[in-house]
Amino acid sequence: MKRKFTKTGNSWAMLFTKTMLEIMDIDPEKDQVEIEFDKNTLIMKKEK
């Protein structure tokens, strides 16, 4: 899956589709995520 970044003020954002959030079992209104970096790979996990 390919995604593009969107300019938001002085920052950049990436939108996640409902399907992507469902696959990761993330409710964006109540869950938080943990973000890690491994060289050029971004790893995002639902915080337990």
Image (tube, rainbow, N blue to C red):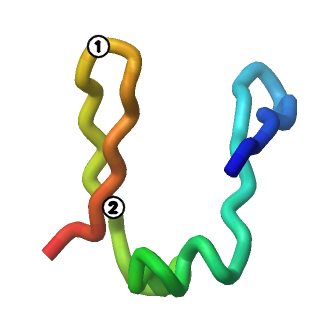
Tell me, for residue 22, which label it has, or none: none
Local secondary structure at mark 1: loop
Kindly state the secondary structure of the residue where label 2 is placed: strand
Q: Quadrant of residue 26?
A: bottom left
Residue found at the very far front of the displayed protein: 1
Other-residue count near label 1 (Cα within 10 Å), few / some / many at <14 / 14–19 / ≥20: few
Mark 2 crowdedness (10 Å alpha carbons): few <14, some 14-19, many ≥20: few
Question: How far from the left and from the top, in percent, is residue 47?
Answer: 21, 68
Q: Residue at x 41, y 75 (%)?
A: 24
| Left or right for 44, reference 3 | left
Residue contact between numbered discs 2 and 1, judged by CB atoms under 8 Å? no
The alpha-carbon separation of the residues under discs 2 and 1 comes to: 19 Å
Percent across and percent down for residue 45 are: 28, 60
Residue 30 higher or lower than 13, as above or below: below
| Residue at (78, 34) in percent of width and height | 5
Instruction: Give the quarter of the image for residue 13.
Output: top right
Query: With 14 as the anchor, is 36 left or right in this view?
Result: left
- The mark closer to the camera, 2 or 1, is 1
The residue to which callout 2 is attached is: 33
10 shown above or below 45: above
Q: Decide if residue 35 is on the left or right side of residue 1.
A: left
* Residue located 24% across and 23% down the image: 38
Q: Which residue is mark 1?
A: 39
Q: Which amino acid does the dot numbered 2 rest on?
A: Val
